[in-house]
Amino acid sequence: MGLDGLESTTPAAAIAVFGDHVDRAERFVAMLREDGVRRGLIGPRELDRLWDRHVLNSAVLGEEVPRETSVVDVGSGAGLPGVPLAISRPDLDIVLLEPMARRVEWLEEVVEELDLDGVTVVRGRAEEKSVRKQLEPADVVTARAVAPLARLAGWCLPLVHESGTLVALKGASAAEEIERDRAAVAKVGGGEPRIAQCGADILDIPTTVVVVERVARQKSGSQRKRSTKKGQRSA
């Protein structure tokens, strides 16, 4: 432990991001370091960059999440970004959604070990009808390294209410992905995607996220024709 009671490897940025809850973040990092590779949650090369590449990188997306809102973290896996977000933002109500049983078990252990109030673990996939029925429409859906934007929007936007948002962690190719998938995103009810840089004042390398608002889905040409004919018959 360092002089201030922190692990010697804890970066100064962690204090700025997690504040009084930095001890929980340290414990989460320790859990990943102890069991992450063995349990197939992270690769062995990631052990030396757990803070900057995974935990802090995930937590700062809270800049795009309004206070006291509900969040569904799709494909939570090792708990990224959901667990760091829960630690840094205890005002949020978060569901960690994960389809694999062994990862669900891990997430439940993390929630219990870190005493994360307001965090629930649910097993399932975002695209499953049963999951969509089980979960209340959220304010925000988060995802990290789950799928290309078009597919991700199709899975995630049905989980948020209208005017809710998808906040997806992306890399340097975010602009190219938006250009490629813009039409597909609009087709499933998404607004114009925008890029945001989170943690720019805290991290050496900010986190790039793509934010998509759920809007009213536009009717296709055939739907408009059917609506018009129905209206004419009613008249």
Image: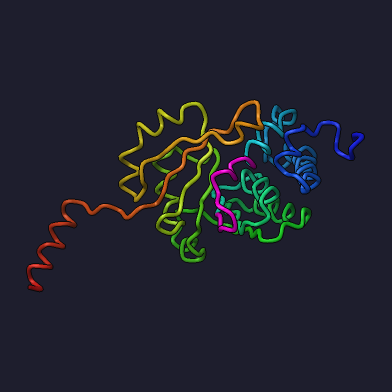
Position of the N terminus, as image quadrant, is top right
Residue at the extreme bottom of the image, as rendered = 234
- The image quadrant that residue 182 belongs to is top left
The C terminus lies in quadrant: bottom left
x then y, percent, for residue 63: 58, 43
Q: Position of residue 225 (x, y in %)?
A: 12, 57
Image side of residue 225 versus residue 60, left or right: left
Would you say 152 lies left or right of 77 here? left
Residue plotted at (55% across, 54% down): 72
Residue in the image at 89% along x and 37% along y? 4
Q: Quadrant of residue 61?
A: top right
Q: Residue 38 at x, y = what percent? A: 74, 39
Magenta residues, as a range?
59-71
Say which residue appears at 69% left-offset and 47% top-offset: 88
Q: In the image, what residue occupies the spot 39% across and 51% down?
A: 214
Residue 211 lies in the magenta-colored region = no
Quarter of the figure with residue 92: bottom right
30 above or below 92? above
